[in-house]
Image: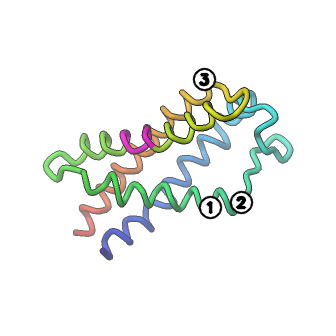
Amino acid sequence: MWDSIKTYVLILPVFLLIDLTWLGKIMVNFYKSELGALVRLEGDSLAPVLWAAIVVYLLIPLGIVLFALPRVDPQNVLVSSLSWGFVYGVILYGVYDMTNYSLLNNYPLRMAVVDIAWGGVLCAVVTSVAAMIDRLLK
């Protein structure tokens, strides 16, 4: 259990750094144009509700440690961690985006598809980092 807690704590900044770079630098204009009036802005920057963003950034890596990491095959760490992380990310982001698409007026399908793909890639990368950390701790 302590190894899982250590792994969780160590992947938090990895997840945060990668996702904030994606959201705040690489894709900021895409998200602003796709979401239009739905997006919270402060000047030209995204301005999320801080407490809600913190909850998201605590929960997603926790899910990686609890649901994706235990499925990683110790005989094939890289491929299985990328695969299970990708599956976890697509499920998680898919539920979020498809719920938004089904319930919100004008939620762009293009946005949903890009976000689901991003969730898969992000969680795949972070799960592979978590798997490496987990191996080092054991």
Mark 2 falls on what kind of element?
A: helix
Residue at the image position 73 percent from the left and 51 percent from the top: 48
Residue at the image position 35 percent from the left and 60 percent from the top: 66
- Range drawn in magenta: 86-91
Q: Where is residue 58 in the image (x, y as percent from the top left)?
A: 53, 62
Residue at the image position 62 percent from the left and 28 percent from the top: 111
Instruction: From this view, report whether residue 43 is shown above or below residue 5.
Output: above
Residue ID for mark 3: 110
Which amino acid type is shown beneath numbered disc 1? Answer: Ile
Disc sitting over residue 50 in the figure: 2
Left or right of residue 30: residue 8: left
The reply to whether discs 1 and 2 touch (Cβ–Cβ < 8 Å) is yes
Residue ID for mark 1: 54
Instruction: From this view, report whether residue 69 is shown above or below residue 102.
Output: below
Which amino acid type is shown beneath numbered disc 2? Answer: Leu
Counting other residues with Cα less than 10 Å from the Cα at mark 3, is it few (<14), some (14-19), or many (20 or more)? few
Which amino acid type is shown beneath numbered disc 3? Answer: Arg
Mark 1 falls on what kind of element?
A: helix
